[in-house]
Image (tube, grey):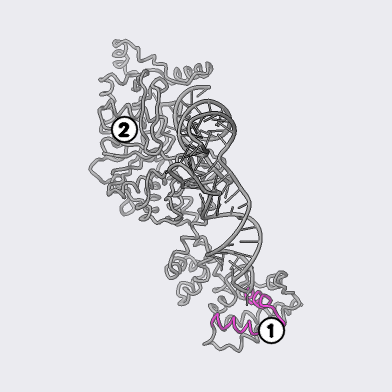
Amino acid sequence: MRTRFAPSPTGFLHVGGLRTALYSYLLAKQTGGQFLLRIEDTDQERTVEGAVESIVRSLAWAGISPDEGVMMEDGLVIERGSKGPYIQSRRQATGIYREHAEQLLASGHAYRCFCTTERLEEMRRQQEARKQAPMYDRQCLHLPENDVKRLIEAGTSHVIRLKVPHERTIRFDDDIRGTMTFQGHTVDDQVLLKSDGFPTYHLAHVIDDHFMDIDLVLRGEEWLSSLPKHLLLFEYLDWKAPRFAHVPLLLNKDRTKLSKRQNAVSVEEYIAKGYLPEVLLNFLAMLGWNPGTTQETFSLPELVEQFSLDRVQKSGAVFDLEKLDWLQGQWIRKIPVTDFAERIRPIVGKEYPTALHDADFEQKASLIHERITFFHEASAMLGYFYEEPGITTELLANEKQKVKPEELPTILTTLLGILEVIPEKDWTPERLLTDVKGEVAKGTWKLGQLLWPLRSALTGLPYSPGAVEVAAALEREKTLARLKRAREIVSALS
RNA sequence: GGCCCCAUCGUCUAACGGUGAGGACACAGGAUUUUCAUUCCUGUAAUCGGGGUUCGAUUCCCCGUGGGGCUGCCA
């Protein structure tokens, strides 16, 4: 099956766009077909410089690479394939859209309209005042042939409109929604070719999807109401229409269409925040689709295998970030520790260069593997291994753990007494814990009263990996030095 | 206003017309005998309303209601 994604280069790639691209990609891949990327830049005014690069880059980041059409090679945007060009402004230059608009004119399914924007605006105003649906009143449909000829010769600016058959009922099947029906008289005579010679979306999509041999058009639900126009065009051009699947919209918390005002909507924002491509894809796939099992995490190959349109939801889905963050945690924990360590090493190294050559970095990284959500948190979580932490009495004491400030000097001395007798070669988390517990067994202190001051003296943090794990990774000498320093601080204050 | 689409826990969702309406996120409580996190266990929580059809409707039909989309020489 050949599918395509056809965004307009009006800005960054939208997360909703990434989802339709993903679904299209999955369908193409699972049938051994091709996925195409086409750029729809027929609106000269809305086209944004650099948007094509940005969209292609975001798609590549997500691992959704087109087999044909617009793609990235060596950092450059290129076009590849035998059905090109794949950028509509370049296709326009070939005359393909005008040609077919004229064919529709000749067959009587379209007509020229010379109405000015002012007249159209006035007409709509009046229609609304009369509580009628704003629709073109067909003034130019009834223009005598001679007048049309004269106006064209005079070079009068005009558009070409589709002549919608009012008496017809248009029925069709959508792969997600099933059968739908529209009455012809409720469908407006859509502009097909604008006065600047560019096609509108409607004409361009029909022509391009035909010539690019697209089997299935998968797009957002916002296109549902213009589908009758597209079907009519396929019919009038005497082409076989592709299948259509309209996916439900992504929603804000208040259930309106996902918008910039209420959410981060561009893929670039999620990249910048540090989400893994696997996570965004996994999350987006599950918004509006479910596997019918309790599986929650899916890799791209798993999605290719399991995705199907008949399990796609009809109603819109709220884009809820909480599950996204949970998924990110799940995916991070799936990364083998060695790989995880190598991924965060450069991040930590940026702030603490010694981490770059730390032979025991993996041991330290393993301590935060289950605690981290974003890689960029790593340096803050491991900083105490590479610089002396700031320690205060307030931090070392802890009411909940029953660590009273005035007892700190005694506790720290006790801790040093326990640890100093452990030789370098036995400096493991297990041995450290065993010996601390041995002290607890004597009955003076509870475990928390010893471990809280130990952990906070070593890390300078209220939350961190466990005391003995940190001590082991920090090594004997540094651990003892930090405890001594802590003891000096508390004795100076008492 | 008109046209079209949609409707199960707060959110994402499951359920050949027969289930105690299931799972996940979030939330609450607990366990993992130090914090945080992880992991595990438990709990709170839903079929929009009204009519049909049927022995039996979350499921099928109709009418409401609610929400959304479209209504541009934008896509």
CB under 8 Å between callouts 1 and 2? no
Q: Is the magenta stretch mostly helix, strand or loop?
A: helix
- What's the residue at 35%, 45% (across, down)? A24
Rendered image quadrant of residue B25: bottom right
Which label belongs to residue A413? 1
The quadrant of the rendering that contains the N terminus of chain A is top left
- Amino acid identity at mark 1: Thr
Left or right for A106, reference A421: left
The quadrant of the rendering that contains the C terminus of chain A is bottom right
Q: Callout 1: residue from which chain? A: A
Pinpoint residue A420: horizontal percent, then vertical percent. Answer: 61, 87
**Which residue is at the front of the view, A99 or A34?**
A34
Based on the picture, tell me whether residue A318 belongs to the magenta stretch. Answer: no
Left or right for A336, reference B48: left
- Amino acid identity at mark 2: Val
Pinpoint residue A457: horizontal percent, then vertical percent. Answer: 64, 75
* SS label for mark 2: helix
* SS label for mark 1: helix
Based on the picture, tell me whether residue A431 belongs to the magenta stretch. Answer: yes
Q: How many labels does the image show?
A: 2
Left or right for A246, reference A454: left
**Which residue is at the front of the view, B46 or A99?**
B46
- What's the residue at 40%, 53% (across, down)? A62
Name the residue carrying label 2: A206
The answer to whether residue A48 is above or below residue A74 is above
Q: What stretch is highlighted in magenta?
A: A428-457
